[in-house]
Image (cartoon, rainbow, N blue to C red):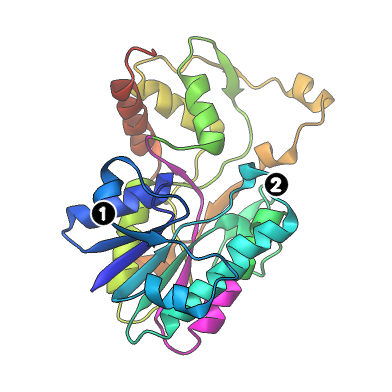
Amino acid sequence: MTTIVTGANGFIGGAIVRHLVARGEPVRLLVRKPPTGALAAMDWRPLPRFDAREPEFRHAFEGARAVIHCAALNNDEGADPETFMQVNGELTGRLARAAANLPHCRFVFLSSLRAAADAGWSGRFTTGMAPSPTGLYGQSKLAGEKAVTKAFAGTGRGTSLRLPSVYGPGMGGMLAKLAHLADSRWPLPLRGMPGHRPLIGLFGVTSALDALLEAPRLEPLYLAADRAPSSFAAIVSALRNGYRRRPNLLPFPWAVVSAFRPNAAIFAAQSADVGALEGLEWQAEPDSVRGLTETAKQISQASPEVR
């Protein structure tokens, strides 16, 4: 029986494929574009569109024991509201229903903490909190979660896994920008800056998926994150340690920053309750420091000429 991974060309999807292959599991890729490099030799099929006919979904899922759905439109892709809902919401629902029709097939939808609340919200994420996303990305991810819950109601075979920002070589978004800043000699005014956010490494994601695929029965929703959240200062310090640079952090310039009325999201204080996933014998990393440092080491080893 085969484990199917959608979005295998992406940062997280690619890491999941490598993890499954290393375990010796049969894997099939569902991708929008033909895979390249090492993935090109693997079993792959086109990822059906949200409005595809039912036979396309049956063909894609033939022989599946589990589906890990990573493919999505992300915050930085500039899509319109309709496209966000079609890809992150409607397509997720179509895939979930197709998997639910297969006896014993499991389905894990990789969602985001943005499905629960916006980046500027402060508080502790839990599986029981009332979702309140206002952004297109978060709303479309929440729509996908609801579709999965509906498709697998009462079966214990389908779930959504909400993730924070994920670190590792090839990471994007905020962490990629911070990694670039950290790999400079310039002092950065981050010491004492308020706010913190949960993070997770690629290993934490793949080990969480192992736990979900092996659990006797799944709840509709889980959260995964390193146990302690990280401030911007801690993130940059850990990355600079991996680059073999001193932290070189200056005090945060409260007076200057407050005059410009910055985006409140950078000051948000967020954490995540991962107790439900730990109930499946998954272990969260105590914090993100070691993983971020190792990430920077791997980045520098992969491209020493750039540095």
Say whether residue 296 is visible.
yes
> The residue tagged with tag 1: helix, strand or loop?
loop
Q: Quadrant of the C terminus?
A: top left
For the question of whether residue 280 can be seen, the reply is no
Across and down, in percent, residue 142 comes to: 62, 66
Give the vertical position of 35 relative to 281 (above or below): above
Residue that mark 1 sits on: 42
Badge 2 or badge 1: first in the primary sequence: 1
Label drawn at residue 120: 2
Q: Would you identify the image quadrant in which residue 261 lies?
A: top right
- Tell me: 173 left or right of 275: right
Question: Going by the picture, which residue comes out furthest to the bottom?
Answer: 154
Question: Within 10 Å of the Cα at label 1, are there few (<14), some (14-19), or many (20+) other Cα atoms?
Answer: few
Q: Residues within 10 Å of mark 2 (few under 14, many from 20)?
A: some
* Depicted 125 relative to depicted 148: above or below: above
Of residues 114 and 268, the one drawn nearer to the viewer in this rendering: 114
Q: Secondary structure at mark 2?
A: loop
Q: Closest to the observer: 74 or 33?
A: 33
The kind of residue on which mark 2 rests is Gly
State whether residue 214 is above or below residue 237.
Answer: below
Which of the two residues, 60 or 125, is positioned nearer the viewer here?
60
**Residue stretch in magenta:** 145-169
Magenta stretch encompasses residue 147: yes
In the image, taking residue 181 as reference, residue 261 lies left or right, namely right
Q: Which of the 4 image quarters holds residue 29? A: bottom left
Mark 1: which amino acid?
Met
Is 257 one of the magenta-colored residues? Answer: no
Q: Residue, x 30% and y 81% (percent of image)? A: 216
**Image spot of residue 101 (x, y percent):** 42, 86
Residue 97, position as x, y percentages in the image: 50, 80
The N terminus sits in image quarter: bottom left
As measured in the structure, the alpha-carbon distance from the residue carrying label 2 to the one carrying label 1 is: 41 Å
